[in-house]
Structures are given as structure tokens and as C-alpha cells.
Amino acid sequence: MFNKILIANRGEIAVRVIKTCKRLGIPTVAVYSEADADTLAVEMADEAIFIGPPAPGESYLQMDKIIAACEETGADAVHPGFGFLSENAAFPKALEKKGIAFIGPNPHAISAMGDKLESKKLAAKAGVNTVPGFKGEIVDDQQAVEVAEDIGYPVMIKASAGGGGKGMRIARSEDEVREGFKAARNEAKSSFGDDRILIEKFVEKPRHIEIQVLGDKHGNVIYLNERECSVQRRNQKVLEEAPSPFLDAKTRKKMGEQAVALAAAVDYDSAGTVEFIVDPDKNFYFLEMNTRLQVEHPVTELTHDIDLVEQMIRVASGKPLEVTQADMKIKGWAVEARLYAEDPYRGFLPSIGRLKRYTEPAEGDAGPGKLRIDSGVREGDEISMFYDPMIAKVIGYGKTREKAIDALSHSLDRMRVDGLQSNKPFLSAVLDEPDFRSGNIHTGYIEEHFPEGFNGTLPTEKQLKWMTAASAYAHVLDQHRLAHISGRIAPADEIEQLECVVILDGQSFAVEVQLDDLGVAKIWIPALSTDPLELTTAWRPGLGLFEGELAGEAFCLEIAPRTEGYNLTHRGYRARALVCPPRTASLHAKLPEKEPVDMAKLVVSPMPGLVVSVAAEVGQEVKAGEALLVVEAMKMENVLRAEVDGVIKTVSAEPGASVAADELLIEFE
């Protein structure tokens, strides 16, 4: 096929492409910026070429640097991954002039489908259902308001050259249109170098369902099964699955045939995705076509037993498709979770920093199903403010949807992410939520089920048992270890059985622990169980994951020591556990609660980032909800607003300045 392939990307997708190339015996070249010099992709590739500063506009978006790296290493083909240059038609044209193959669709298909304005016209011409909307480019916020009012609220404002949720806003009023238009245009320009904006009708409670297509250079085009990507936040997909729990065979076939018709209309010759929105009555409308590999492609690969990267490489080398439409049978179910470096308890703001502890469970068997992990990081790596905050894609596979979800939940429990915040608790909470479990989802699912943001979940009785037992056992083991240190007064036999009280976020549980052997104990928790519970575990002090069986049922939770107890997390529930003697517990109950600090008159940066603009000055009177400044991180703009009415006392932020998390930016009188 090819002698050497350069991957014009970074992170997990670069690692993903390298893995397929290694299996095919094709040498690889990684390119990297200053921020990515020590990454996993650079380590795995056969060669690596430095291409510039961290900012994508000075490195990964520089075509001349990518081409120079090809010439320097002798790479005769480039895989663009997703994002960056993957949907820039000028890139394959520039490669072609140098005799370098582009592992993706032809430039005509990219141009036709990459421009959302033109793609809708082509889709309508090809007989594909389209969403009502304005067919031209929006030049300013006033025109945006006029168009939105003509279409009727709510509307979707989106970047014409966009993708991945960047440069997208939903607006339900004139003010939201004006604000959303400006923000979407800024994001579009910084992410894609193209600030053109379009507006279309927003379908209420739609499902986001997409069809994977695959074409070759011999006129063959087929569709694979659909992916449901309805669980989204800020128009960014969070959970994806294949197939959809909503579609029937008839609708699936219609969507697939329309996707193929559109692909054939532009002579599509690679892997691509036609995205649709589907209303509650199963009416579907063309949304856009992504002329690249999708982030969520693993769920399709697992349910078809196919390697899409390999197919892209084969097609780019001129080979015909190995598979036909008749081969595309759905095999089982797959659910993918995007593990992000973001804080779900603070509005999902990016969490930048170093992965002080990062462990992944082994791929393969996972509970009732199987596990696949696509990751581009290792323990000790840094999540940078310059790029997407994804840590890994965690995919559960099973014979049924329930088993796939359970396999994914089982695997997330056994992942450890320390040093920065991650959305793991939120992902687990959604996977346990009844509406998600039943397949009752739509693109507004997160806003509907978490209207006040994510503040964790209430504990189940099982979680209380697991956390109480784990805390008590960990305490006994700590005492047991201390008793065996030379010079300690307490003899070891006095530690084998211990009575204590575990206080979980204010709830007190009397506990008696009998340590039968290292790793085996009987736990009495009268408030939660009438019978003693047998605990078996390999946990030792210092381990961040407490995995074991309680009364024969397996569980795994996060545990970290704190004064007199532990911090515990299991899925969406996190608690502080205080472990102490009964007398001490009775005294703790009498201590007054500490009053929280009033932060209403302080505006602090919720994350590390760059100040984009400041709309406040000293002495200015502002109203609650008024936008004061914009902070950007990981290509996303975050508007900081006043929490109360008041007069501004100090402004310490300036446009272009770097700020740290919790840094004071504005203070009120």
C-alpha cells in the first residue's frame, strides 16, 4: 500500500492511526508541537518531527510544515486524523502537487461537504431531507437577528466550516442571537480559520443520529450501521452508541440510502459520516457531512468487526472496498464515553494540569462485556490549554445494550485520574440514570436531567454499604500496620477486632470489623444490614482504587486518605468519610458547621486560560447576569457574568493576559 505514513495530528487519534499502521507493517511519522514533545504518539511512532509552538495556528495547521516533514522523512502518505487540516480541501491539493497521497476523500468532496452552506444545497439536490434555514452567509449580528426571526425561534447558529461542537450556539431570543453570533464567529475563526456563519431552525428534542459511509475510487459506496450521539453538552458529544436504540429497520435503511446518495453525488472515496437530526416521530433531516474519520468511530468498528483506518488506507492506495452492503450486519452493541479533563461540578470547565496518577483497566473482558480504550496519554502527561481536553475514549461492548453499558460502567469504575478533574463521575451518573438506560434520550438530555448543573448523585444503599465497609476496613488495616511497627504500644491482637463509627457526609454508621486475615474481614453495619458482611479485597494503604467483594458482590471505588478518614467516590456519588471511636463521633456531632465564604462580589477565573475581552471598568454599575469578561481555554470561550447588582471596585484582568484557576479578576464594592 504505502511505504511510510505521516499522521498530521496529535493525541489519541494519532495513537489510534499508529496502531493500525503497526499491525499492517507500515512505518509511521508523528509530528509534534512544543507542548507535545513527550507524548505517547511521539513515543510510538517510528519517527517524529518538530513543527512549532503549541498554538495550532503555528504548528498543526501549517500545511507547509507538514509537507516539509513528509519530504524530510520520505513519507508518501498523510493521515489527517480529525480536526486540524482533516477537512481543509487545500491540504490534499498541496500534497498532490508533491506526489504525497492523502488518506481521506478527494478535494472536491471535502469542498462540497465541508462547507455547510453548499452541502445543504447539494443534499437537497440529491434528494436528502434538509432542515429549514437561511441558505446564505450571515454577515453581521443584525442580519442574524433578522434571519432568526424570519425562521422562527429557536434557531441554531453554527460555523459554516465547523465541526466537533465548535462555533455552535442555540438561540431563543434576539439577545441570545446577538451574543451567540459573536461567540460562534470568534470560535469558528480560532478553530477553523473561517468565520462564516449560518443559521437554521432548531428542532426541539431531536436525536442526533449519524450514518457511517465508506467509498472507494472505483465508484463503490456503502453505508454501515448508525451511531446515536444524542447525549451532548454545549453541542459536543459526550456519549455515543451503535446502533441507535430508537431506529427501526425501515428508518435505518432510508437514512442509509440517503447518506449513500449524497456521498455518491460528490464521488466520495473514503470513510465519512452523514449526520442527521431525528424528531420524536422519526422524521429525519440532513445536518452535515463530516469528510473525515469521526471521534466516535470505535463503536462502529466494534459492531461491524471492521477497522475503518485500515479501510481508509486501502482506499487511498487505490484498492477497491473489501466489503459490500450485504456484509454490513450489526453485531452486538457498543457504547463510548469521552473522558475529558473538565470539572463537572463547576459547569464542566476545562481542567488543565498534569496527570499525577492515571491508570486504565486492561482491554478485553470487562464485567458482562468487553472493553476498548483509545487514549493518547500516560501517567505524568500534561493536559494542555491549547488543545481539546480529551483524556481517553472508553468503549464498552456487549451482546446487548444493557451489557455494553454495564461493561462501560465497570471499566470507568476501575480507571484512576488524579492531578486534575475529569468528567468520570458525570459519565458514570448518566450511565446509571433510568432514562438513559431505557434509551429515552435527545440532544437536550443533559440540560433536562441536570438543569442546575451536575452536583453529584444521592447515594444508593449499596454505595453506602460499600463506602462504609471500605472506610472501616482501610482504618483497621492502617491501625494493624501501625501496631506492627517496632516501638508501638498497642499489641497487634488488639487491632484484629475494632469498633468504630463511620460518618459519611453527616450520616453516622456504627461498625464492627473483624480482620480474619489480610484481605478478608467480617463487617457488621447494623443500620444497613442485619447480618455480618464478608469483605474480600486486595487493597493496601496507598492504592487509590479500593476493589473487592462485599457479600459476594464486586465493587470498585476511589479512595484517598484525609485527616481521620478518607475521601471516597463511586460513580456520581462522592463523600467524606470520618472514621473514629464512638465517643469521638458523639463529640463531632456537636461541632458547629463552618459558614461558607460569600463569593458573590468576587469574579474569579474558573480555569486557567487567556482573557479574550473585558467589558467592565472601575466605577461601572452592573446588573446581575451582565457579561463582564470572556476567558478562553481549549478553544472554547467562557463568558463570566456578574452574580449580583453592584459597582465595580477593581479590575485586574486585561485582554490577552494569561490567568490561573481561581485568580481574582474583578471585585465589587
Image (cartoon, grey):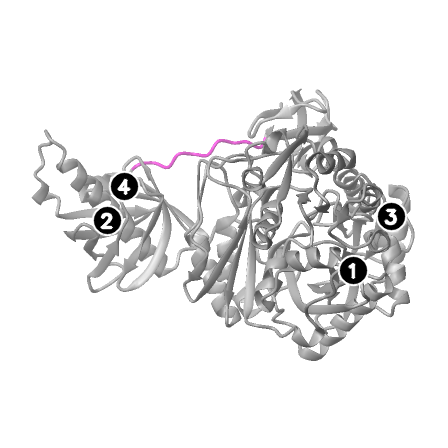
Can you tell which of label 4 and label 2 is closer to the viewer?
A: 4
Name the secondary structure under disc 3: helix
Residue 231 in the image: above or below residue 44: below
Work out which quarter of the rendered image holds the C terminus and state it.
top right
* Residue that badge 3 annotates: 145
Please name whichever residue, 111 or 91, is drawn nearer the observer in this view of the structure.
Answer: 91
The quadrant holding residue 301 is bottom right
Q: CA distance from mark 4 to mark 3?
A: 60 Å
**Magenta residues (range):** 591-600
Residue type (three-letter) at the residue carrying disc 4? Pro
**Is residue 658 or residue 640 the one in the foreground?**
658
Read off the residue under disc 4: 541
Q: Earlier in the sequence, mark 2 or mark 3?
A: 3
Q: Is residue 667 visible?
A: no
Q: Nearer the viewer, residue 529 or 359?
A: 359
Vertical placement of residue 527 versus 472, above or below: below
| Residue 269 disc label | 1
Mark number displayed over residue 40: none
Residue 104 in the magenta stretch? The answer is: no
Q: Label 1 sits on what residue type?
A: Asp
The residues bearing labels 2 and 3 have C-alpha atoms spaced at a distance of 62 Å
CB contact under 8 Å: marks 1 and 4 = no
The residue at which mark 2 appears reads as 473
Task: State the SS at label 4.
Answer: loop
C-alpha distance separating marks 4 and 2: 10 Å
* Residue 11 in the figure: left or right of residue 372: right
Identified at 68% across, 78% down, the residue is 249
Q: Residues within 10 Å of mark 4 (few under 14, many from 20)?
A: some
Amino acid tagged 3: Val
